[in-house]
Image (cartoon, rainbow, N blue to C red):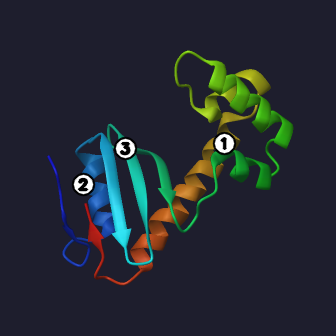
Amino acid sequence: MALEGYLEDLGIRDILQILSLSKKTGTLTLKVPQGEGLVCFVEGQVIRATSSFFPESLGQLLRRNKIVTEDQVNEALKWQKNLGHHQPLGQILIDRFQISSAEIEQVVALQIEKIVFSFSVLSTKKRWM
């Protein structure tokens, strides 16, 4: 099912709630003249959000919040690159460096919230797909 329209017709919070309650999996693309973003869902749960407004990677966010060191991120990225399959950076940091999953989840949740909020406060004539 593909959705396309204007946020003035249905607010971003409503869209997120619909996707959550219907347990959808996919990616919501948000585009405004100033930039764009993606919100990724798995069974209705937001698992990731990216935005041209906040381009920091997970490693950068975790370093800025003093949860990991630059060496830990670099080693985890090397480990990730050498795996035969994809494993999320956060999971590697949890498994190999005993970084608290709660701390990683908190940083990710705040970043997702910041990204979603940035799109909800921009002008109401935004296009979403």
Q: In this view of the protein, which residue sits in the foreground, 23 or 57?
A: 57
**Cα–Cα span, label 3 and label 2:** 12 Å
Name the secondary structure under disc 3: strand
Q: Residue at x 26, y 47 (%)?
A: 21
Q: Residues within 10 Å of mark 1 (few under 14, many from 20)?
A: many
Asked if residue 24 shows in the view, the reply is yes
Q: Where's residue 3, x and y in %?
A: 17, 57
Name the secondary structure under disc 1: helix
**Cα–Cα span, label 2 and label 1:** 26 Å
Q: In this view of the protein, which residue sits in the foreground, 31 or 109?
A: 31
Left-right relation of 64 to 89:
right
Q: Residue furthest left?
A: 1
Left-right relation of 5 to 94:
left
Q: Where's residue 14, x and y in %?
A: 28, 64
Q: Residue at x 66, y 42 (%)?
A: 104
For marks 3 and 2 on the same chain, the one whose residue lies earlier in the sequence:
2
Name above or below for residue 10 compared with residue 77: below
Image quadrant where residue 125 sits: bottom left
Residue with the mark numbered 3: 41
**Cα–Cα span, label 1 and label 3:** 18 Å
Q: Which amino acid type corresponds to the residue marked 2 in the rendered image?
A: Ile
Q: Where's residue 20, x and y in %?
A: 31, 48
Name above or below for residue 8 compared with residue 14: below
Residue with the mark numbered 1: 104
Q: Which amino acid type corresponds to the residue marked 3 in the rendered image?
A: Phe
For marks 1 and 3 on the same chain, the one whose residue lies earlier in the sequence:
3
Asked if residue 69 shows in the view, the reply is no
Q: In this view of the protein, which residue sits in the foreground, 42 or 2?
A: 2
Q: Residues within 10 Å of mark 3 (few under 14, many from 20)?
A: many
**Which mark, by number, is residue 18?**
2
Q: Which amino acid type corresponds to the residue marked 1 in the rendered image?
A: Ile
